[in-house]
Amino acid sequence: MTARDQFALVGRISGGRVIDPGSGLDSPADILIDERGRISRIGRSGSGASSVESDGDVLDATGMIVAPGFVDLHVHLREPGREDEETVASGSAAAARGGFTTICCMPNTEPAIADQETVRFVLDRALAAPGRVHPIGAITRDREGKSLAGIAEMVAAGAVAFSDDGAPVGSAGLLRRAMQYSRMFNVPIVEHCDMPDLSADGVMNEGLVSTKLGLRGIPPVSEEICLARDIALARETGAHLHAAHLSTAGSVEIIRRAKAEGVNVTAEVTPHHLILTDDLIARDFDPLYKVNPPLRTRRDVDALRQGLADGVIDCIATDHAPHAEQEKDGEFDLAPFGMVGLETALGVCVKALIETGLLDWPGLIDCLTRRAARAFHLAAGTITVGSPADLVLIDPDAQWRVTPESLISKSKNSPFLGWELTGVVRATIVDGRLVYQDFAAGSSLSTAARRERSVTSTAKR
Ligand code: DOR
């Protein structure tokens, strides 16, 4: 019994444009879901009009896109330790609102997810969450960078990847050993690429804007040197390196060359690095724009977009980083790094990638689903008969305004407050259960479902 069992079971989703990049499907289709919440059939729209596989509700997806539930490889859930900012349950609910059905949570909690007990603790909390949550274990004990954490025991407990995110592993020797070890378990080593002696005390991108503002900068080369070092180690050890939140044009080129050479490397980019630039900080010194790695320049944004479109960057990951209002709403210098992103990811990516003509809907969905799942070897991100029904229904042309009240996350530190975004998540389904829905009043899903169901049962009689 999990929290999902309390949500309504969906029996059929009809009339939507089903986009599944994994199978190449992009056409009107009905999806049937059985009693166990698994996909039992994908059929031509209307062909199974009178059939429901289970007793579940019928969702009318006319005018909507039906896609695999999104997969986010980079989320900060703050539990244990800062449950005032986010919990496993509240973060998973925010994820569902954003269309994500699978999220991976970073270990920079208090205490860090650095042993078997804490991995188990998070997985236990995940039983009360609407979506799937996979813990990422720390590479080093307590994320202190001094000795390796118990990687084997954490893999056994269910950790899917390893990272000291928030900081890189400073010691090349230690990282090399972690990589050698990770190969035995086929798990990625996720690096927050940064050279602390280059970025120390920096609060934003180093460049013209930081110079004008008199703020200490974090130079692009700080990310790029660390990435180059990590790639050298991945090349030597054969381990899988996953580069978190790329932020510079130079990093895209480094990944491009490494991949061409056959190094086992994958990379992600955040929605905010695909759209925001450092000059926004000059406008109002708002700490909502303070993030690590920092927002860079237009040239970097363009290179990151192109890198994603080319497939050099594997996927989009939010780096959802909730922070308490009293900590974020202060002096720029003192505010913590990070911004929430789960709920705005889709709309921001539509603006950055679809409205600019770089990707179409199947292309964007691929970056949020199959390409992400593949990077971490997760069994998710596709619509397959026999697999759990993890799906999202998107109203592609509908718009919404981001306000603090519109966000489910416990923290509201979004730089997109006030933005009008296109692309509304209308329903999120995990294991065949409707864990999130947002249908306009009057066209309530359950009303439609009840009506359809009674028609179906009348027809059956
Ligand atoms: O901006 C960030 N916030 N970058 C990180 O690497 C960590 C994250 C956090 O945990 O707040």
Image (spheres, rainbow, N blue to C red):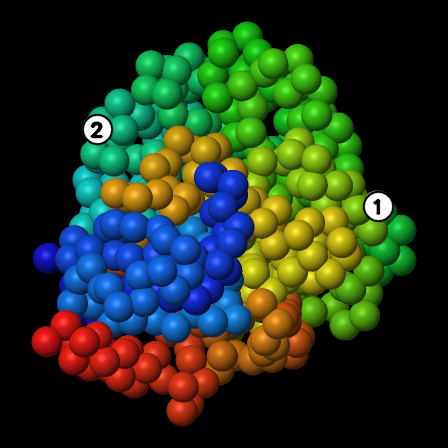
Which quadrant would residue 299 be assigned to in this image?
A: top right
The location of residue 234, given as percent across then percent down, is 54, 16
Q: Is residue 103 visible?
A: no
* Residue in the image at 65% along x and 34% along y: 311
Circle 2 packing at 10 Å, graded few (<14), some (14-19), many (20+), is few
2 or 206, nearer to the observer:
2
Measure how far apart labels 2 and 1 are at the Cα level. Answer: 43 Å
Choose top left, top right, bottom left or bottom right for residue 85: bottom left
Query: What's the residue type where badge 2 is placed?
Result: Ala
Query: Is tag 2's residue or tag 1's residue first in the polypeptide sequence?
Result: 2
Q: Is residue 402 above or below residue 237?
A: below
Residues marked 2 and 1 touching at CB (< 8 Å): no
Residue 299, labelled with which disc? 1
Q: Is mark 1 within 8 Å of ligand 1?
A: no
Which amino acid is tagged 1?
A: Arg
Residue at image position (45%, 85%) is: 440
Q: Quadrant of the C terminus?
A: bottom left
Q: Say which mark, if any, is on residue 174.
A: none
Of 149 and 456, the residue lying toward us = 456
Badge 1: residue crowd in 10 Å (few <14, some 14–19, many ≥20): few
Left or right: 333 in relation to 296: left
Q: Which mark is residue 156?
A: 2
User: Residue sitting at 37 percent across and 53 percent down?
Assistant: 43
Q: Quadrant of the N terminus?
A: bottom left
